[in-house]
Amino acid sequence: MSDGYTALAETVHRVDALIDEARLNRDEVLDIADLSDRTGEPESVVKTLLKGHPCRGEEYDARVIRRLLYLRETRRRPFRGASHFSREGTQVSWEQIAQAGQITRQGLSASVANSKAPNGRSLLGIEDFFQVRNGYLTATAPKALRIALELVIPSLESTVKIKEMENRLGATVALRMPTEQVKNLTPKQIDLLTAIATDMIDRNTQP
């Protein structure tokens, strides 16, 4: 397969393996609505890709304009002067988007009307304005989903490590720590914690 499908399949396989290892529910871990928002793809496309099926192809320009319209619709200012976005609030103006992309209002209007993507530099400015990763507007559907899934892997790896630590120590040492602190541990930190706890238990059980 091409167009990013092979890389996506490998990432999905990795995520599924971690979900199984952690004994978690796939539907709960992979929030379709969240993945849809992170990729700029409809939920139906995300579901199709997660099943290992290819989705309908889309021209570059059409994809960019579609996602630009999606960002303008879903990233709103909760109040005047706000530096962050939310689902509720005032829709940003095309003038503001044009300024972010360093193009004229008329130029941006023509791009949207004719489904013709602005140049790469303008797209980077627009992505920065909407506070999304660079490449959000341009990535193919399989590539966008692969990137979104890769962000899930670290927390899954940590969950697996925590469960391994609990099994090895025969006691939920990690649960004695604040929940948020446990979630923020990296796999290496969990390995270190396991080694320290194991050593302490060994010392206390020695005659």
Image (cartoon, rainbow, N blue to C red):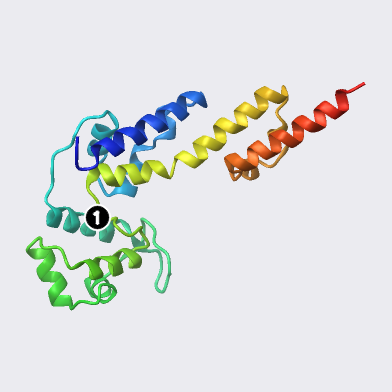
Quarter the N terminus occupies:
top left
| Mark count | 1
Q: Say whether residue 134 is visible.
A: yes
Q: Which residue is rendered at x = 81% and y = 28% of the image?
A: 201
Q: Which residue is rendered at x = 29% and y = 66% of the image?
A: 124
Q: Tell me the SS state at disc 1.
A: helix
Residue 11, compared with residue 125, is above or below; it is above
* Residue pointed to by mark 1: 70
Left or right placement of residue 62 versus residue 182 in this view: left
Percent of width and height locating residue 85: 39, 62
Nearest the camera: 88 or 11? 11
Residue 53, compared with residue 101, is above or below; it is above
Percent of width and height locating residue 82: 43, 70
Residue 44, compared with residue 64, is above or below; it is above
Quarter the C terminus occupies:
top right
Q: Which residue is rendered at x = 79% and y = 32% of the image?
A: 199
Percent of width and height locating residue 26: 41, 28
Quadrant for residue 103, please give it: bottom left
Left or right placement of residue 144 versus residue 156 in this view: left
Q: Which residue is rendered at x = 36% and y = 45% of the image?
A: 148
Quadrant for residue 151, please give it: top left
The crowd level at tag 1 (other Cα within 10 Å; few <14, some 14-19, many 20+) is some
Q: Say whether residue 34 is visible.
A: no
Nearest the camera: 183 or 186? 186
Nearest the camera: 153 or 75? 153
Three-letter amino acid code at disc 1?
Answer: Tyr
